[in-house]
Image: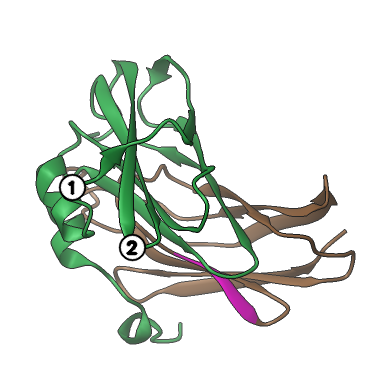
Amino acid sequence: MAAGPMKMRASVAGGNTEVRVLMTHPMTTAQMKEGLHHIRNVVVKQNGKVVIEGEVSQAVSRNPVFSFRLKGGAKGDKIEVSWVDNKGESNKIETAVA
Amino acid sequence: MKPLAALAAWNEQAFGAKTAADALQGIGAAGAAPSKDIVIEAPQIAENGAVVPIEVSSNIPGTTAIAVLIEKNPFPLASRFEFKEGALPFVKLNVKMGETSDVRVVATAGGKSYVATREIKVTIGGCGG
């Protein structure tokens, strides 16, 4: 399985912005026959500003789903999430807060 | 795709560590103090070790990073997120667990490290295949 599309939804709840993002990625471990292939870096931007930077290992499940919370926020804010894997592949998605 | 990998940080020392102690050292959290202000939401028993949902947050003021370590995985460090101005110290993710293990969650605040631990029992391991 190759890396593929992403899905994201972002909404204001309880005064904060809730972001839920799905990444299509095999996330295979070194022990698997496919060999090590995993997302390493995840970056979340709010209106162009980096708010979260993450590093993740092969221990994250296949087709990763992450939830994040941003302070405040309003309908129409632009949220961007991007990833880079250990083979240099990358992808990103941008959505407006609903 | 774009060669962004060269720009992205990757803590090989911590993520390549084979023990939780070495991984903690790799993220500068060797002397983490136990804290009840780190919240771990996770199942007590995970039937499928390939997908174990873990939700972590920190109520320690000034928390700037949260790391998740799975003590008995071959490489214990699973994730480390840094929270900048504008983000709440919270993340939910799904992880693989090879067997029943303690899960350690380390929060960084004001240059100090804090840790909370939770055991998750795993019925079918999820690292090989």
Horizontal arrangement in the rendering, residue B67 relative to residue B129 (left or right): right
Q: B26 and A20: which one is in front?
A: B26
From this view, report whether residue A19 is shown above or below residue B35: below
Secondary structure under tag 2 reads: loop
Q: Which residues are magenta?
A: A49-53
Residue corresponding to mark 1: B31
Secondary structure under tag 1 reads: loop
Q: Are marks 2 and 1 in contact (CB under 8 Å)?
A: no
Which colour represents chain A? brown
Picture coordinates of residue A58, whole percent (x, y)? 29, 50
Which of the two labelled residues, at mark 2 and mark 1, occupies the earlier sequence position?
A: 1
From this view, report whether residue A14 is shown above or below residue A48: above
From this view, report whether residue A73 is shown above or below residue B37: below
Which colour represents chain B? green
**Residue B129 occupies which quadrant of the picture?**
top left
The answer to whether residue B74 is seen in the rendering is: yes
Packing grade of label 1 (10 A; few <14, some 14-19, many >=20) is few
Picture coordinates of residue B122, whole percent (x, y)? 32, 17
Residue corresponding to mark 2: B111
Chain bearing tag 1 is B
